[in-house]
Image (cartoon, grey):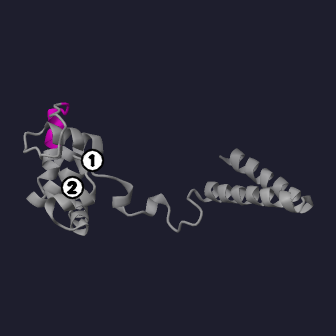
Amino acid sequence: MIDLIQQYSDALKQARKMYKTANDEDKKIISGMISDLVYSLEWMKTSRMPGNRRGIERRAAYQREKPFDPLLMQRYFRSTDEDVYEWDDHLQEHKIDEWDRQRIEDALSVLTEREREVYLMSRGHCLSYGQIANYLCISKGAVQTMIERAEKKIAERKTESLFCLCG
């Protein structure tokens, strides 16, 4: 990385020298190159996107990670024997092993019935908040609140449960 930063710094110096002697038409192109080089150097030196006040390490937990792998949740939902909604045209899939099923069911056990329904519609069927809201006759904000609350409960359960700690 140090070599790359050095190469970009050298290119920036050359671009600034060229800018001083260039004509008006070339100055537009060179100034774009200079701004791109400065942007790239700042990103490499600070390890975060220029202009951002916080790096990825300081983001809120819900922005960094999801409680479960989305594909695992989809396979789990499709492999359950629960009622299938009329808008679900997927066939039942039985590609999830018993250990994953127990881990997921343990984590989902802390949710209320409504939170579980909304969470599985979102994560299992990949429906948008608007689609869920229309189907359940509630607002999109209520859907978002329930999903955030469900993810928080699941994350807390993962830290407490023996099932979830092992996987």
Residue 34 bears which disc, if any? none
Q: Residue at x 20, y 54 (%)?
A: 119
Query: Is residue 28 at least partly visible in the picture?
Result: yes
Give the quarter of the image for residue 166: top left
Rendered position, 156 above or below 7: below
Q: Which residue is mark 2?
A: 154
115 or 100: nearer the eye? 115
Query: Which amino acid type is shown beneath numbered disc 2?
Result: Ile
In the rendered image, residue 151, in percent from the top left (x then y), is placed at 24, 58
Q: Residue at x 45, y 59 (%)?
A: 57
Q: Which residue is mark 1?
A: 68
126 or 47: nearer the eye? 126
22 or 13: nearer the eye? 22
In the rendered image, residue 47, in percent from the top left (x then y), is placed at 57, 56
- On whether residue 138 falls in the magenta region, the answer is no
**Mark found first going from the N terminus, 1 or 2:** 1
Q: Which residues are magenta?
A: 95-103
Q: Residue at x 16, y 31 (%)?
A: 94
Give the quarter of the image for residue 131: bottom left
Left or right placement of residue 47 versus residue 154 in this view: right
Real-space Cα distance between discs 1 and 2? 9 Å
Query: Which amino acid type is shown beneath numbered disc 1?
Result: Phe
- On whether residue 100 falls in the magenta region, the answer is yes
Check if mark 1's residue and mark 2's residue have beta carbons within 8 Å: yes
In the rendered image, residue 71, in percent from the top left (x then y), is placed at 28, 40
Identify the secondary structure beneath mark 1: loop
